[in-house]
Image: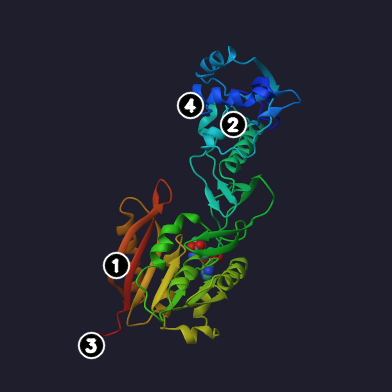
Amino acid sequence: MILMVTNLPKEIEYLKVKKAEGQKTLNLIKINSKKYSVINQKYKILYDDEFIFFPLEENNELIEKVIASIENKIEIEIITKLSIINENYKFNSLQDALKGKIPDDYQELIPKSYDLIGNIAIIEFDKFEHIEKSELSNYKKEIAKAITLVNKKIMIVYEKKSEIMGTYRLRDLALLYGENKSETVYKENNCTFKLDVKKTYFTPRLVSERRRVAFSEIKQNELIVDMFAGVGPFSIQIAKNHDVRIYAFDVNPDAYSYLKENVKSNMLKGEVIPYNLNVKDLLKPSDTLDKSLQGKADRIIMNLPEKSIEFIDIACFLMKKSGGFLHFYQFSEKPNPIKRTIELLNKKLNDFNWLIEKIITSKIVKSYSPKAELVGLDLCIRSVNFLRK
Ligand SMILES: C[S@@+](CC[C@H](N)C(=O)[O-])C[C@H]1O[C@@H](n2cnc3c(N)ncnc32)[C@H](O)[C@@H]1O
């Protein structure tokens, strides 16, 4: 099915009355329809020297009743006229904003949700191989524009073009609407984060998890290591609320650069010290930082869910031998993803002569794919060689 998608104004029906009768008409409309429900507020009311033109809703069952009640009191005419979009109209939903723009057969194209990062929305479309490419591209642009009409804060819309990939955990994004800019400012739990959605990893989907960790019981002066800090959402929210010292690492120079800026711009109670470093390098004998950090951490955050498990040696190297807290995130396959993660972690810790002393929290943070979940564990771990007195 071909439906031309266009941003040009379309012809709609208007109720035409003399200017002098405008207010009286509005009063009659108000009395005879639910408030002003027959007036199509997506379009502007138009005027010329003599007349006012009220845009009418399409297929509204009250229109006939309203017209019947007005026409014996006021001289009216129903005419068709080129409409002008009312930019201030607040659409209730994406479906509302897309009425008449996406054919009924293709309604499943409209995404149920999208990620919102500052003034940027990021949408994912399922594969629609049965729709011709240029037609599909038009619909995607219409949907992107509609997103900005529903949420006036959104200025730019990108489409996800790949999975999250590579060491820096980035994905390909294609611009669908707005300026070709990928830097934005995102607010969460009373903190602000400047970031670039193309050059740095960031997901708004962990907002509750970050709040939970940031407001958990953290002691004053704890030494914390955020091994995969990104632009700093965990580190900064913890340091905003606690008087602690956090060493925050990220191997991506862009993430590091935003992390530094975000540390400065958020008024922190504690201290966050950013490093642009591959945490594996902490084990290199040449590294000077290792001396000050070896066996010093009270708490470690490991949010690299594709392969946190591969960095357990670093966590054991950094954590106090007497024990500390580990916030561990890992993608894990179903069934029993939590059990699998605990078993895997336990085995890996044992390889380095460490053990799980206590599981404080174990949960599925969010769904990752049809086959796997993002598992989050809060644990106390300690070295096997540390003997309790
Ligand atoms: C999944 S992101 C998490 C970022 C951040 N914790 C958050 O919640 O937004 C993982 C981050 O780890 C960084 N990273 C990956 N491998 C690393 C390594 N070996 N050393 C330090 N950082 C690394 C990536 O650049 C990326 O920014």
Of the image marks 3 and 2, the number of the one nearer the N terminus? 2
Q: Residue at x 56, y 63 (%)?
A: 193
How far apart, in angstroms, are the residues tagged by discs 3 and 1? 23 Å
Identified by mark 3, the residue type is Lys
Residue topped by disc 3:
389
The amino acid on which the numbered mark 2 sits, given as a three-letter code, is: Gln
Residue 270, position in %: x, y? 47, 77
Q: Of the residues shown, which amino acid type is indicated by label 1?
A: Ile
Residue 342's quadrant in the figure?
bottom left
Q: Which mark is residue 360?
A: 1
The residue under label 2 is 41
Quadrant that contains the C terminus: bottom left
Q: Nearer the viewer, mark 4 or mark 3?
A: 4
Q: Position of residue 181 (x, y in %)?
A: 67, 54
1 vs 2, front mark: 2
**Split into 4 quadrants, where in the image is the N terminus?**
top right
Among numbered discs 1 and 2, the one appearing first in the sequence: 2
Mark 3 nearby-residue class (10 Å; few <14, some 14–19, many ≥20) = few
Of helix, strand and loop, which one carries label 3? loop
For label 2, the crowd category at 10 Å Cα-Cα, with few meaning under 14, some 14 to 19 and many 20 or more, is many
Farthest residue in the left direction?
A: 389
Helix, strand or loop at mark 2: loop
